[in-house]
């Protein structure tokens, strides 16, 4: 899918929340600016020159996108902060009048934000193109060109995966002992859990993520989604056992379907399900360029913390994690629980 930064606030915010990419963008663009309050700032006059647009054009965008620009660092300086800034940027304020009492300034993030909004400026269009190229390069470098497994760079992935594996064994054992149905029940009820959590069966999920037939769905799921699935599998296994003991016989499929329906309405599980849907829809759109159409209204901008989790210095490939003695010790403790 082609990313259109001028039309999508979520796509813009996903770039601006990606600190790893921002550092590369800052390095490549070399826009200059003034060091102020541990950031780099630009005056409106500087941006008029940079983007070759008028004062009225920039003012129009400030008015229309004020909340978004402020969220990303645009601010209006007054009083002591203004005086300090004037002492640093005096030579660029000649067009602001002799007695400046208030001035709007853009930090690096809000400058990029403005570049992603300005449709009248060819310079801004060129900058948008360079920004997207750099973001793509960062993802390619961090993921080795295989973003479908970016979920495994999360430090919580291995422990969540192991927990889900344990609950999965409990669930399949319960299906074997307590459900009157042929062996195809394992695939059917795996899909029912997927549909409960993220509204897709395994086949649909694989098509959306463009997975091969050899790829396992659960190897691509985020830790938060795995934990939600674990909770449901564990709960269903216990409910099936209780129902089996109550009835004195194996459950029929309709009886298990009823248990799943009741579980889907469980008020304790709802926040986890909602979070899993938001997590999957938002991250897959940003990291994997994959749209889960049934979860489209759950899509949000990915947080800075998430970008650091999957692309930052603390993120590591699965191979790196498995070679870490501390990680292996954690898995050993989980195994012994």
Image (cartoon, rainbow, N blue to C red):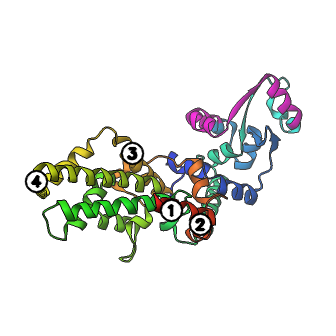
Above or below, 111 relative to 185: above
Q: Is residue 35 magenta?
A: no
Q: Which residue was labeled with disc 4?
A: 248
Q: Can you say whether 127 is above or below 139 in the image?
A: above
For disc 2, the marked residue is 321
Q: Residues within 10 Å of mark 3 (few under 14, many from 20)?
A: some
Decide: is 207 above or below 24.
below
Q: Please give the range of residues in magenta.
A: 59-88
* Label 2: element kind: helix
Q: Secondary structure at mark 1?
A: helix
In the image: residue 69, left or right of residue 30? left
Horizontally, is 220 left or right of 132 in the view? left
* Mark 3 and mark 2 residues within 8 Å of each other at the beta carbon: no
Name the residue rendered at 34%, 62% in the picture: 168
Verify CB contact (< 8 Å) between mark 1 and mark 2: yes
Give the mark nearest the N terminus, 4 or 3.
4
Of tags 4 and 3, the one toward the viewer is: 4
Q: Which residue is mark 3?
A: 272
* Residue 119 visible in the displayed image: no
Quarter of the rendering containing residue 337: bottom left
Q: CA distance from mark 4 to mark 1?
A: 38 Å
């Amino acid at each position: 899918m082609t990313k259109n930064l001028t039309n999508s606030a979520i796509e813009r915010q996903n770039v601006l929340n990606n600190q790893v990419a921002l550092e590369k963008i800052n390095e490549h663009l070399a826009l200059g600016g003034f060091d102020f309050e541990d950031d780099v700032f630009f005056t409106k006059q500087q941006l008029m020159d940079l983007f070759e647009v008028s004062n009225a054009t920039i003012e129009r965008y400030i008015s229309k996108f004020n909340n978004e620009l402020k969220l990303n660092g645009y601010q209006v300086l007054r009083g002591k902060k203004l005086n300090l800034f004037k002492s640093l940027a005096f030579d660029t304020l000649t067009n602001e009048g002799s007695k400046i009492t208030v001035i709007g300034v853009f930090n690096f993030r809000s400058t990029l934000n403005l570049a992603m909004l300005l449709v009248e400026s060819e310079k801004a269009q060129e900058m948008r193109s360079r920004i997207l190229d750099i973001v793509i390069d960062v993802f390619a470098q961090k993921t080795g060109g295989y973003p479908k497994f970016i979920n495994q760079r999360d430090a919580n992935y291995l422990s969540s995966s192991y927990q889900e594996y344990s609950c999965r064994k409990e669930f399949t054992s319960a299906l074997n002992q307590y459900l009157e149905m042929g062996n195809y029940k394992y695939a059917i009820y795996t899909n029912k859990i997927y549909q409960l959590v993220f509204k897709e069966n395994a086949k649909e999920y694989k098509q959306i993520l463009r997975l091969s037939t050899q790829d396992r769905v659960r190897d691509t799921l985020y830790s938060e989604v795995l934990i939600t699935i674990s909770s449901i599998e564990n709960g269903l296994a216990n409910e099936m056992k209780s129902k089996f003991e109550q009835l004195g016989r194996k459950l029929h499929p309709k009886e298990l379907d009823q248990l799943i329906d009741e579980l889907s309405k469980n008020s304790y599980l709802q926040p986890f399900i909602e979070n899993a849907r938001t997590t999957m829809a938002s991250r897959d759109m940003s990291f994997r360029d994959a749209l889960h159409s049934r979860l489209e209204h759950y899509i949000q901008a990915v947080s800075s913390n998430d970008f650091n989790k999957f692309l930052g210095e603390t993120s590591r490939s699965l191979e790196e994690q498995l070679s870490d003695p501390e990680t292996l010790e954690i898995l050993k403790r989980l195994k012994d629980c």
